[in-house]
Image: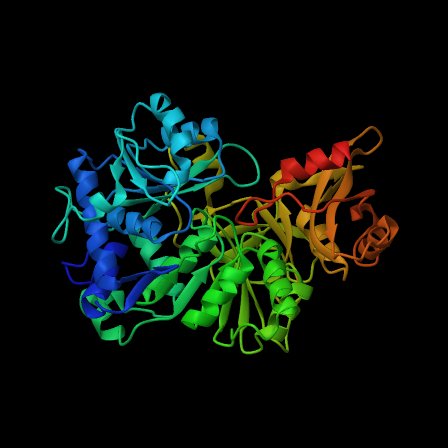
């Protein structure tokens, strides 16, 4: 690492440099609120000063109990500035889940939207480590007397803020993930590795070996306008926004508490948005429906890049989006908090790949049970293994760290639990995770493989596949499915659709039709919810 000595390999320095070079360019927009880069940086300094005035130390953490908003990214910037981790907090969590998360993460400050005041008030006595509460006015609950008004905090510093301990490449970046099972766990990244990951995939790629001089040289104009339809509290939405801002772009936060496709399309039209981040079918379907209902209402022709990750997006939805956005490319990214860049699939109007089929990332192996490479075209199911830039492990969980981050063939790797088959052309067919594998009659069935096939049926809008207890087979496969209004295929039709593409034992024994397939706000599958429906319906 040969960058000039003064460069600290921290995203805060990149954003501070952007603010110096493009002070009047828009950095964040939400509704009628617009913040320039100079304002974004100054407000983050105010939050950083408030955190330090609250007796923050290097071991402290600040929780973001926030919906998508300018404040969310300001808090991130503030935390980067003073070298402490910000902790993403799922706003759908109940009291006990939040208590567990903030206790596990050693949170000492919480920034929360006013609408969450009742929950926070009930929790205060159960999280004794938290000594500072900062209230963001969202027009709902007023700021309680035990909290600091966010706008007061944002105005707390007239200049750049630094902590006594400074900041640098080894600062901790915490990304809490709930996954599909279990309690949330914190994945620990070094600041330098996170910065380089963002730099590698952003539209503006800086020569960071030259430090600040390299950023100034490569930052020639304001970047693209971007909208994350997915929540910032999860990776797809957060990194979509940070990648745009990394290049001097503008992150536009939607104002509605939940995803509103009409608001999204209004913003795309108004701000000439070029890039969009969503999470699979749950978002794409609403966008397609809105465009189909009022095809002449919006000019969304500026869209060039659609990033989708965290939820499966079928061929039908990709085709429908590209009918409206023929100049766009849909990048279906396959990643995990434990290893970025595991695979990607690029869809354009003339080329839509098979659902669940990805080109592997440059640092991905597919290995068999003996840790030997799986031969292309062999149809052997192997585990996906990531190498190169990796997290340090799980926060306060050495056992889980040892099981996931393993040395294989002399190389430190991440083994998140995903499996796939390597086709003859080198692409990978994603099969699913170990934790979601169904065992029926002694055969292993990976849920995502079956979901991908069902999702390609013309009547299906969303699907989750689960295993339920079966006295004869151990487990039987059940598909929980939602369909297009007015289309109601018989269960036998969907079962036959799967059998035409996959081995018969992988086909559902039963199909449960529901209005809405259970998912979290970011589109991530709610398998326990789907399993409950499969058992009771």
The spot of residue 239 in percent (x, y) is 41, 56
The answer to whether residue 396 is visible is no
The foreground one among 419 and 516 is: 516
Residue at 83 percent across and 51 percent down: it is 495
Please state the horizontal and vertical placement of residue 69, each as a whole percent of the image.
38, 52
On screen, residue 269 above or below 60: below
Residue at the spot x=49%, y=73% of the render?
304
Marker count (numbered): 0
Q: In which quarter of the image is the C terminus?
A: top right
Quarter assignment of residue 479: top right
**Quadrant location of the N terminus?**
bottom left
Give the left or right position of residue 403, taking residue 42 as reference: right
Looking at the picture, the colour scheme in use is rainbow
Whether residue 234 is visible: yes
- Is residue 415 placed above or below 285 in the rendered structure? above
Residue nearest the observer in this picture, 384 or 338: 338
Residue 202: x and y in percent read 38, 66
Q: Position of residue 422 (x, y in %)?
A: 64, 59
Q: In this view, does 7 lie above or below 478?
A: below
């Amino acid at each position: 690492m040969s960058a000039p000595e003064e460069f600290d390999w921290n995203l805060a320095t990149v954003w501070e440099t952007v603010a110096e070079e493009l002070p009047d360019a828009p950095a964040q927009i939400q509704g009628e609120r617009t913040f320039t880069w100079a304002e974004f940086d100054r407000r983050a300094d105010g939050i950083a000063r408030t955190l330090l005035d609250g007796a923050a130390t290097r071991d402290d953490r600040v929780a973001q109990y926030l919906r998508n908003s300018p404040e969310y990214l300001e808090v991130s910037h503030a935390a980067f500035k003073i070298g402490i981790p910000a902790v993403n907090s799922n706003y759908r969590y109940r009291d006990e889940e939040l208590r567990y998360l903030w206790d596990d993460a050693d949170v000492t400050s919480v920034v929360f939207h006013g609408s969450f005041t009742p929950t926070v008030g009930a929790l205060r006595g159960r999280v004794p480590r938290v000594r500072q509460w900062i209230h963001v006015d969202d027009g709902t609950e007023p700021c309680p007397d035990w909290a600091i008004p966010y706008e007061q905090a944002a105005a707390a510093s007239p200049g750049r803020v630094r902590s006594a301990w400074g900041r640098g490449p080894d600062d901790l970046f915490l990304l809490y993930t709930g996954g599909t099972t279990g309690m949330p766990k914190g994945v620990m990244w070094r600041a330098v590795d996170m910065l380089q990951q963002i730099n590698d995939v952003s539209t503006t790629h800086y020569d960071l070996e030259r430090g600040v001089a390299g950023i100034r040289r490569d930052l020639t104009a304001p970047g693209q306008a971007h909208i994350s339809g997915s929540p910032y509290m999860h990776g797809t939405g957060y990194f979509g926004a940070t990648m745009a801002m990394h290049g001097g772009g503008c992150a536009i936060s939607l104002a509605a508490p939940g995803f509103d496709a009409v608001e999204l399309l209004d913003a795309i039209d108004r701000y000439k948005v070029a890039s969009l981040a969503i999470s699979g079918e749950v978002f794409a379907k609403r966008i397609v429906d809105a465009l189909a209902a009022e095809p002449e209402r919006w000019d969304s022709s500026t869209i060039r890049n659609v990033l989708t990750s965290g939820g499966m997006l079928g061929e039908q939805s990709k085709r429908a989006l590209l009918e409206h956005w023929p100049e766009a490319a849909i990048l279906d990214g396959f990643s995990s908090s434990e290893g970025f860049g595991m695979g990607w699939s690029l869809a354009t109007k003339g080329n839509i790949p098979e659902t669940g089929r990805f080109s592997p990332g440059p640092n991905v192996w597919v290995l068999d049970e003996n840790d030997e490479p799986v031969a292309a075209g062999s149809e052997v199911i192997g585990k996906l293994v990531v190498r190169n830039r990796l997290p340090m492990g799980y926060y306060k969980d050495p056992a889980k760290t040892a099981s996931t981050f393993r040395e294989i063939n002399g190389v430190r790797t991440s083994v998140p639990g995903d499996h796939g088959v390597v086709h003859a052309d080198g692409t990978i067919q994603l099969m699913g995770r170990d934790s979601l594998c169904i065992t029926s009659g002694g055969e292993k069935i990976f849920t995502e493989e079956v979901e991908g096939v069902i999702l390609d049926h013309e009547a299906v809008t969303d699907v989750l596949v689960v295993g339920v207890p079966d006295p004869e087979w151990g487990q039987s496969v059940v598909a929980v499915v939602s369909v297009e209004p007015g289309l109601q295929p018989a269960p036998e039709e969907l079962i036959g659709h799967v059998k035409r593409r996959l081995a018969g034992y992988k086909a559902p024994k039963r199909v449960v039709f529901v209005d809405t397939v259970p998912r979290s706000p970011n589109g991530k599958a709610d398998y326990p919810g789907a399993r409950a429906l499969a058992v009771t319906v």
